[in-house]
């Protein structure tokens, strides 16, 4: 039922095709505290689903620093995340087999992420799935990141399919909201965490084991 009569499946990236979401929190904490930012748990929750550009500007507004530019701080965060991805175990079980199964059913495969564009191939190569995607889209190239639908609508255009013909797989409320606003069917992915549930998702998926 999840994929019936659908022409494309569009994946979020962090936490959906590669288990890298925790690395962003680690990197942001390391970099911004080193610049003198006082990071509260409440504000960290606010930045959790922002793009790295949005998060960098957010922290600068709260506690301006003068050691480096905002853009340099942003790049420091991304570089640290890349280091963590390359050195830590971050594969999501059976994701390659799952995507290959979807392709065998005739589905086009897309990616829509808040992460920077140049960061995408690094993650997909690390996950061993770079060869399986027909189109990728980064919110870096949009006016607004998730929860706005822009990046999902761009991915659909690149795949040459209508939004209503797409299924989105997401692991966050903001991402699910973005997919819903785009007019797509949305699956909430938990990666085996029984405590996660999204009441606005059309379906839930707990693992990629078929």
Image (tube, grey):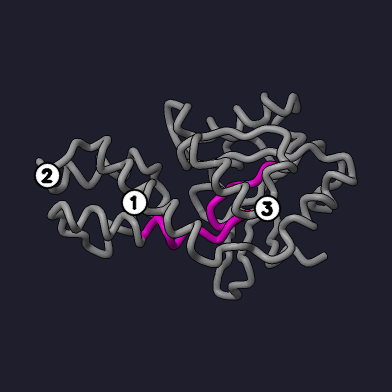
Q: Quadrant of the C terminus?
A: bottom right
Residue numbers of the magenta segment? 10-25
Residue 200 in view of the camera: no
Which of these two is toward me, 112 or 82?
82
Dot 3: element? loop
Question: Residue 32 location, x and y as percent?
Answer: 22, 53
Task: Give the residue drawn at x 74%, y 24%.
Answer: 160
Q: Quadrant of residue 179?
A: top right
Dot 2: element? loop
**In the displayed image of the protein, which residue is found farthest to the bottom?**
194
> Which label sits on residue 47?
1
Mark 3 crowd level (few <14, some 14–19, many ≥20, 10 Å Cα): some
Is residue 12 within the magenta segment?
A: yes
Reading the chain from its start, which is encountered first: label 1 or label 2? 1
Mark 1 crowd level (few <14, some 14–19, many ≥20, 10 Å Cα): some
Task: Give the residue drawn at x 54%, y 45%.
Answer: 122
**In the displayed image of the protein, which residue is found farthest to the right?**
105
Reading the chain from its start, which is encountered first: label 3 or label 2? 2
Are the two marked residues, 1 and 2, in contact with CB atoms closer than 8 angstroms?
Answer: no
- Vertical arrangement, residue 8 with respect to residue 192, above or below: above
Reading the chain from its start, which is encountered first: label 1 or label 3? 1
Horizontal side of residue 4 vs 21, given as left or right: right
Task: Give the residue drawn at x 59%, y 56%.
Answer: 18
Q: CA distance from mark 1 to mark 2?
A: 18 Å
Mark 2 crowd level (few <14, some 14–19, many ≥20, 10 Å Cα): some
> Which label sits on residue 128?
3
Mark 2 — residue?
65
Q: CA distance from mark 3 to mark 2?
A: 38 Å
Q: CA distance from mark 1 to mark 3?
A: 28 Å
Dot 1: element? helix
Question: Residue 171 location, x and y as percent?
Answer: 57, 56
Task: Give the residue drawn at x 27%, y 35%.
Answer: 71
């Amino acid at each position: 039922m999840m994929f019936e009569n659908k022409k494309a499946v569009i994946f979020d990236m962090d936490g959906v095709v590669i288990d890298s979401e925790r690395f962003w929190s680690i990197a942001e904490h390391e970099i911004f505290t080193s610049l003198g930012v006082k990071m509260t748990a409440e504000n960290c929750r606010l930045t959790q689903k922002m793009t790295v550009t949005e998060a960098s500007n957010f922290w600068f507004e709260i506690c301006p620093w003068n050691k480096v530019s905002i853009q340099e701080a942003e790049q420091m965060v991304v570089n640290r995340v890349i280091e963590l991805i390359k050195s830590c175990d971050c594969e999501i079980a059976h994701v390659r087999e799952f995507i290959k199964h979807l392709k065998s059913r005739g589905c086009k495969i897309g990616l829509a992420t808040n992460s920077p564009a140049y960061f995408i191939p690094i993650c997909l190569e690390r996950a061993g799935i770079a060869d399986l995607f027909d189109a990728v889209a980064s919110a870096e190239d949009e006016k607004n990141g998730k929860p706005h639908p822009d990046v999902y609508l761009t991915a659909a255009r690149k795949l040459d399919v209508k939004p209503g013909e797409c299924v989105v797989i997401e692991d966050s409320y903001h991402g699910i909201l973005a997919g819903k606003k785009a007019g797509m069917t949305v699956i909430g992915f938990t990666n085996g965490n029984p405590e996660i549930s999204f009441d606005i998702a059309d379906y839930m998926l707990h693992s990629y084991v078929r």
